[in-house]
Image (cartoon, rainbow, N blue to C red):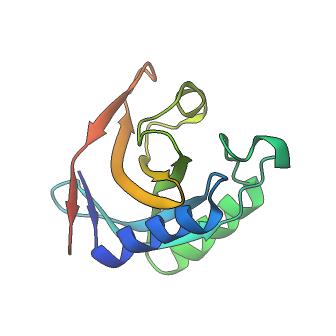
Amino acid sequence: MIRLGDAIVEQVERHGEADYPHEACGLLLGTLDDDGAKRVDEALALANAREEGARHHRFVIRPEDLVRAERAARAQGKDIVGIYHSHPDHPDEPSRYDLEHAWPVYSYVIVSVRGGRAASLRSWELVADRSRFEPEPIVKGL
């Protein structure tokens, strides 16, 4: 389970809209609650480092951006608990590319942006054997 406040959801949706027709991407910073749920306190927008021609259907986070974000999060007593990205004019479901590049410890929040407007948002978790994603319940409005 992942807990996303309304402001976090809106920030992720606005980032997806702003980068449309390219994929937007960023990190979700927060903590684990006593029940094991991921509580997101901050959405950190990042630049999509994918080469220009493929940005409309792929995203890449630079390793140095990931390291910098992890250090900043830890300094605040937080961790990277998830990665978000947008799917321009496609469903909010993980792609084969997403599956090939995912890590089991993170939540993957995907926002579908259709015609420049956020249409839907869902979260996914990679199963331990890395064979597929499973839908992750979202608790909104915290």
Q: Farthest residue in the front direction?
A: 115
- Name the quadrant containing residue 134: top left
Instruction: Answer left or right for 50 relative to 20.
Output: right
The residue closer to the viewer here, 104 or 16, is 16
Instruction: Answer left or right for 4 relative to 103.
Output: left
Number of marks in the image?
A: 0
Depicted 116 relative to depicted 30: above or below:
above
Which quarter of the figure is the C terminus placed in? Answer: bottom left
Instruction: Answer left or right for 103 relative to 61.
Output: left
Tell me the residue at 54%/61% (across/down): 16
Tell me the residue at 53%/46% (across/down): 87
- Name the quadrant containing residue 127: top left
Depicted 132 relative to depicted 55: above or below:
above
> Whole-percent x and y of residue 88?
56, 48
Tell me the residue at 67%/46% (across/down): 59
Depicted 60 relative to depicted 7: above or below:
above
> Whole-percent x and y of residue 114?
48, 51
Depicted 106 relative to depicted 18: above or below:
above
> Whole-percent x and y of residue 4?
30, 66
> Whole-percent x and y of residue 43?
48, 70
- Name the quadrant containing residue 39: bottom left
